[in-house]
Amino acid sequence: MDKNYLRLPEYLKRPIAKLDDAENKNVRQILSKYNLNTVCDSARCPNKTQCFGECTATFLIMGKICTRNCRFCNIASNTPKPLDKNEPENVANAVIEMGLKYAVITSTTRDDINDGGAEHFKLTIDAIRKKDSSIKTEILTPDFKGNKNSLDTIIKANPDVFNHNIETVPSLYKTVRPEADYKRSLDVLSYVKKNSPNIITKTGIMTGLGETYEEIEETIKDIKNANVDILTIGQYIRPSKNHLEVKRYYGKEEFEDLKKLAEKIGIKACISAPLARSSYMAFETYKKIREQNIVPI
């Protein structure tokens, strides 16, 4: 055991999924039928039991292998396989069979592809809308190395929500996201909003990696200056002993304080909770933004 190992607090523990539960079994059968991956499994999301039990999931497209090696993430890093040309259609079929009104789609980072997989995202959104144009789509993308042509492809796809995670404060990037760039990620978010104001933009940050309160505050200000609409804040949980250690577990009250801070800074909607993740309460937050006409349709 690590010398400075911190035990997981009880409020962060979640029950193990019961594989024989009807909804859980149904989700897994659909995913298996269409040979699809989820970030719920690959990233060991603590909310998987709840989401599968509600017959929903966050689709992970473009394979299970990432070309980058972020030290907080459980997704494997290596040489990926070629893209599956049937995947967009398969995701659309799964969305329909699962009865989703709001589909959340993310991906591995694919620096081995010229456009970073932007066209694959577009094809997936197009396939879903072809089957049912009323289904809302949220995509969580990599930074595409800041490639404007890739971002233009995403804008053309016109997702209802565009999400790209900042993840952490700038001082920790070399440790947490060594192959990413803080300013580039902010520029990605800013570019999408500037060129398509009707798309709701979203990002997320983690706590517990060694950041200070002042650094979180400055990061939220940077996020606001990039005109991001939605912010999620959640506790980093170490996937394995090979990943970064947790420096501190934040209490529930601290997450409430961060939510108030974000709202004071001007973030339109903030989900801040110990187990908040990118897709946590995604549909509810989207509806809040739309119902209040915070972002033009």
Image (spheres, helix red, strand yellow):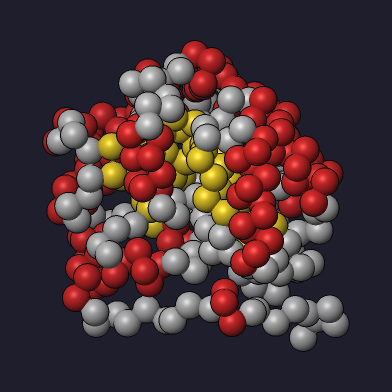
Quadrant in which the N terminus is drawn? bottom right
Task: Specify whether residue 219 is in view.
Answer: yes
Residue at point 67%, 68% (across, down): 251
Q: Position of residue 167 (x, y in %)?
A: 65, 47
Q: In the rendered image, which quarter is residue 285 located in?
A: top left
Residue at point 51%, 21% (across, down): 193
> Seen in the image, is 176 located left or right of residue 130?
right
Q: Compared to 242, does 281 lie above or below? A: above
Q: Nearer the viewer, residue 287 or 57?
A: 287
Residue at point 44%, 81% (across, down): 15
Quadrant in which the C terminus is drawn? top left
Q: Nearer the viewer, residue 253 or 219?
A: 253
> Seen in the image, is 35 located left or right of residue 143?
left
> How many badges with numbers are in the image?
0
Q: Position of residue 259 (x, y in %)?
A: 61, 49
Q: Compared to 166, does 255 lie above or below? A: below
Residue at point 71%, 31% (across, down): 222
Q: In the rendered image, which quarter is residue 11 located in?
A: bottom right
The residue most toward the bottom is: 1
Q: In the rendered image, which quarter is residue 196 located in?
A: top left
Q: Position of residue 118 (x, y in %)?
A: 44, 29
Task: Specify whether residue 78 is in view.
Answer: no
Q: Compared to 211, does 18 lie above or below? A: below
The residue most toward the top is: 195
> Seen in the image, is 230 located left or right of residue 133?
right
Q: Position of residue 67 (x, y in %)?
A: 59, 45
